[in-house]
């Protein structure tokens, strides 16, 4: 049985997406994807804002994990735009730096949680599970 669906811009996604991962650093993105898949989550990765939007339109995930530095304008700005367009997927913003001011900005833009890098696997998984249970 075919477990994929052809989508926008040539993107193929599983029928179910638990996590949409938007991370600019390929090594970090790959590591996070392996972590999530190891514990049984279905994951799709996006390399740019267009892919994020296409995947959200095609198959909304249960959770969006996005780096604050994801796009040239920033992942928080993208999250704000997504919220303005009616995408209400629970979102976790990750950041290399920024502290409390960036966390406040992320929450005001509609983030459900904010995590500073380097990310601890257990903390990241706990945040994702908590967001998905809400």
Image: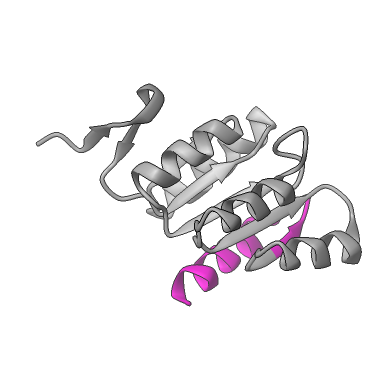
Which residue is painted at 40% across and 54% down in the image?
Answer: 18
| Position of residue 132 in the picture relative to residue 11 (left or right) | right
**Residue 83 % position (x, y):** 58, 58
In the image as oriented, which residue stretches furthest toward the left? Answer: 1
**Residue 91 % position (x, y):** 58, 60
Magenta: predominant secondary structure element? helix
**Residue 21 % position (x, y):** 54, 44
Res 76 visible: yes
**How is this picture coloured?**
one colour
Q: Is residue 6 magenta?
A: no
Which residue is painted at 32% across and 31% down in the image?
Answer: 7
| Position of residue 93 in the picture relative to residue 83 (left or right) | right
For the N terminus, the quadrant is top left
**Residue 35 % position (x, y):** 52, 47
Q: What residue range appears in magenta?
A: 114-134
Res 43 visible: no
Number of marks in the rendered image: 0
């Amino acid at each position: 049985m075919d477990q994929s669906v052809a989508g926008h811009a040539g993107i193929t996604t599983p029928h179910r997406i638990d996590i949409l991962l938007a991370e600019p650093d390929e090594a970090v993105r790959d590591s996070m994807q392996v972590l999530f898949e190891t514990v049984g989550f279905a994951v799709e990765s996006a390399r740019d804002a267009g892919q994020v939007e296409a995947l959200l339109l095609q198959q909304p995930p249960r959770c969006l994990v996005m780096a604050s530095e994801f796009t040239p304008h920033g992942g928080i700005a993208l999250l704000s735009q997504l919220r303005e367009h009616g995408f209400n997927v629970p979102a976790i913003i990750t950041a290399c730096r920024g502290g409390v001011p960036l966390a406040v900005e992320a929450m005001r833009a509609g983030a459900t949680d904010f995590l500073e890098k380097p990310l601890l696997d257990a903390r990241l998984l706990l945040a994702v599970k908590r967001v998905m249970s809400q």
